[in-house]
């Protein structure tokens, strides 16, 4: 958005310089007048604006928690009868996230110039996604903006809680795995060379396990480690590039649903997210086809996204969501049956919320079960790595002791 520099006179008659961002010079002039200024001169800013180059908003991101807090506070202000522009001004002043703060200031300026709240939010996809904008639009049309904002806050809080559960489950194996690799590299680089010198002086024949670790130590302490790192980086980049292709994304996402321990957790998480999001959208008055399109794009798994798209096509042809989901064989039978009952009774949104509650509890239990399995497993892995290195170092010594005996 262009930046304009204006020389203005305030209500007390004092002249000063103001900077304002707007789509056009006419919009900038209108915004300045609405702020109570008399515009004396207005022109577009020339040159590099260092404040934009080093703008903290460029290097920050808006989290689910940020949007949940904003939605809850905004709902309270709207429900209390505070004007939208004034409410956005209050929230922007106390907002700690630079990107969201900047977006709220620009949204407030757009609303003052006559733009709808949803249309203004649509200009900031990094802060407000299609799901958020669609629900806000439905709230504006239905005149229940405060109610929709409360639903959004509840939805986002549930999503954040679900994400935190997954992160908690992955944190322990991630940390222990990093420590295990660090221990292995440390012992290989610093401990094994000490024993290598002893074995060389003794002239004893090395067992295959010991020789293998000696070779690993030589690689890690030589320039060959650069080649090894390069190969690992190349594999990671190749994986990411392959995942960006439609075929690769579909294949990897399909495999992820069948991975032992984690596949069941991924499936339950996807079902809970689908049910909660779809239920919130339909309850807020968003059309079903639009809701399914939004849920499809936010599913996070291509296999599940394809199943949702099939359900969308089924509805366009006059079919039922549950039948389409059952054909794809992606969602659990229990979830499909509950959705089917919701369609038959006309209480689809309420049943979707019950499905979401059930599978969020299932995710919580699955996370606890996964953690209880991974904790002893990681201890065994770390102990096995350290034990293998120590065994490889002491095996040649046993042979030396036998010869001396």
Image (tube, grey):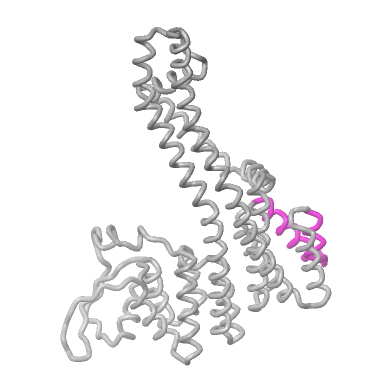
Number of marks drawn: 0
Residue range highlighted in magenta:
302-328
Rendered position, 299 above or below 281: above
Query: With 172 as the anchor, is 268 left or right in this view?
Result: right
Q: Quadrant of the C terminus?
A: top left
Query: With 42 as the anchor, is 355 left or right in this view?
Result: right
Q: Position of residue 89 (x, y in %)?
A: 37, 81
Magenta span has 310? yes
Query: With 130 as the anchor, is 187 left or right in this view?
Result: left
Query: With 263 as the anchor, is 9 left or right in this view?
Result: left
Rendered position, 104 above or below 166: below
Q: Position of residue 51 (x, y in %)?
A: 25, 63
Rendered position, 80 above or below 59: below
Residue at (63% x, 68% y) in the render: 277
Viewer-proximal residue, 218 or 106?
Answer: 218
Outermost residue toward the left in this view: 14
Please tell me in which quadrant of the rendered image residue 101 appears. bottom left
Q: Position of residue 204 (x, y in %)?
A: 43, 9
Q: Quadrant of the N terminus?
A: bottom left
Residue at (45% x, 42% y) in the render: 178
Q: Position of residue 114 (x, y in %)?
A: 45, 82
Question: From this viewpoint, is residue 268 visible?
Answer: yes
Residue at (40% x, 27% y) in the render: 188
Residue at (54% x, 79% y) in the render: 149
Question: From this viewpoint, is residue 23 visible?
Answer: no
């Amino acid at each position: 958005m262009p930046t304009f520099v204006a020389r203005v006179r305030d209500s007390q008659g004092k002249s000063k310089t103001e900077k304002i961002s707007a789509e056009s010079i006419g919009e900038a002039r209108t915004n300045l007048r609405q702020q109570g200024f008399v515009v004396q001169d207005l022109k577009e800013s020339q040159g590099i604006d260092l404040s934009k180059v080093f703008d903290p908003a460029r290097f920050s991101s808006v989290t689910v928690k940020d949007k949940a807090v904003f939605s809850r506070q905004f709902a309270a202000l709207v429900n209390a009868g505070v004007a939208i522009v004034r409410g956005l001004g209050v929230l922007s002043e106390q907002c700690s996230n630079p990107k969201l703060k900047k977006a709220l200031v620009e949204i407030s300026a757009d609303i003052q110039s006559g733009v709808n709240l949803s249309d203004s939010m649509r200009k900031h996809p990094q802060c407000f996604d299609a799901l958020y904008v669609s629900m806000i639009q439905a709230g504006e049309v239905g005149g229940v903006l405060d109610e929709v904002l409360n639903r959004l806050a509840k939805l986002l809080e549930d999503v954040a809680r679900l994400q935190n559960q997954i992160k908690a489950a992955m944190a322990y194996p991630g940390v222990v795995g990093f420590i295990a690799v660090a221990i292995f590299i440390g012992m290989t680089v610093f401990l094994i060379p000490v024993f290598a010198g002893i074995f060389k002086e003794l002239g004893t024949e090395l067992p295959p396990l010991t020789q293998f670790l000696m070779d690993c130590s030589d690689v890690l302490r030589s320039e060959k480690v650069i080649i090894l790192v390069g190969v690992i980086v190349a594999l990671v980049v190749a994986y990411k590039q392959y995942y960006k292709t439609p075929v690769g994304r579909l294949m990897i996402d399909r495999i992820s649903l069948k991975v032992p321990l984690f596949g069941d957790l991924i499936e339950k998480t996807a079902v809970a997210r689908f049910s909660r999001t779809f239920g919130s959208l339909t309850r807020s008055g968003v059309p079903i086809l639009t809701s399914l399109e939004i849920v499809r794009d936010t599913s996070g798994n291509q296999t599940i996204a394809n199943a949702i798209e099939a359900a969308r096509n089924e509805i366009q042809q006059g079919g039922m969501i549950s039948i389409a989901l059952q054909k794809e064989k992606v969602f659990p039978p229990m979830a499909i049956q509950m959705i089917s009952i919701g369609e038959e009774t006309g209480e689809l949104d309420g049943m979707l919320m019950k499905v979401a509650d059930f599978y969020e509890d299932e995710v919580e239990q699955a996370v606890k079960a996964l953690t209880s399995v991974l904790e002893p497993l990681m201890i065994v892995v770390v102990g096995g790595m350290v034990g293998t290195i120590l065994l490889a170092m002491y095996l040649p010594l046993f042979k030396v002791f036998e010869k001396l005996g």
